Image (cartoon, rainbow, N blue to C red):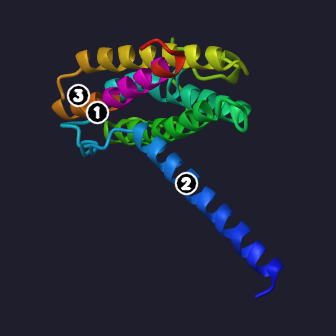
Amino acid sequence: RSFMAKKRIKSYNAVEEKVKKEFFMNEKLKCHCMIHKPYPEIKPAKKDPAFASLLSVPYAGSGGEISSILSYLYGSTVLDGSKNQTVSDVLRYISGVEMHHMNILAELIFRLGGDPKYAVAQGRRPFTAANMHYSENPAQILKSAVAGEESAIYVYEQLQKATEDENIIAVLERIIEDERLHLGIFRELLGEN
């Protein structure tokens, strides 16, 4: 082989090793952003449209899952390629978990006899992008994420107290476990732990 061909192969191999290393690191980081435990099957004991209405708050309300998803995706985008790449990656991975929570809530609302529209019951604030926290400052993004996770945990715990359905309680508990993990990750990135 010519000198140039050998140089190209060596360069290709170096790039391939870098990509493999970055992929492994990203997969490792992604694994730390989720709990490796199955979610309970969604099988409420009976239809309960009133409770389904309550679930509209974390589902589509201001400060609910949709707010977290959009906030985390925004933070991930504005920090992508910066010296805060780890924060960007964590926000992106956690937004995926929050999307899964939305899917779980939609199914739970539907099985309880509700309609999983992106709307909330009367008297509650619906999601609006006007209430979003937009910052390009990593510390502010993380502080907002901490506040959002604390709020989500509180809301889910209150919902658990508002039902006697063991399946609903278990489903909400599993979501709470994710939110507690996310809270710990965001606090660690802020240097609070």
Which sits earlier in the primary sequence, circle 3 or circle 2? 2
Q: Which mark is residue 174?
A: 1
Magenta region's main secondary structure? helix
Please provide percent x and percent y for residue 119: 55, 28
Position of the N terminus by quadrant:
bottom right
Q: Secondary structure at mark 3?
A: helix
Residue at the limit of the structure toward the bottom, as seen here: 1
Residue flagged by tag 1: what amino acid is it? Arg
Residue 49 belongs to the span the image colors magenta: no
Q: Which residue is mark 3?
A: 169
Vertical side of 122 occupied by 117: above or below: below
Crowd around label 2: few <14 · some 14–19 · many ≥20 (10 Å): few
Give the spatial CA distance, label 3 vs label 2: 41 Å
Q: Secondary structure at mark 2?
A: helix
What is the magenta range? 176-187
- The residue positioned 30% from the left and 29% from the top of the image is 172
Please provide percent x and percent y for residue 11: 73, 67
Q: Which mark is residue 21?
A: 2
- The residue positioned 83% from the left and 78% from the top of the image is 4
Which sits earlier in the primary sequence, circle 1 or circle 2? 2
Q: Nearer the viewer, mark 1 or mark 3?
A: 1
Q: Is residue 6 left or right of residue 132?
A: right
Residue flagged by tag 3: what amino acid is it? Ile
Which sits earlier in the primary sequence, circle 1 or circle 3? 3
Please tell me which residue lies in front, 86 or 50.
Answer: 86
Q: Secondary structure at mark 1?
A: helix
Please tell me which residue lies in front, 72 or 122.
Answer: 72
Res 16 seen here: yes
Please tell me which residue lies in front, 183 or 172.
Answer: 183
Vertical side of 147 occupied by 129: above or below: below
Residue flagged by tag 2: what amino acid is it? Lys
- The residue positioned 54% from the left and 35% from the top of the image is 90
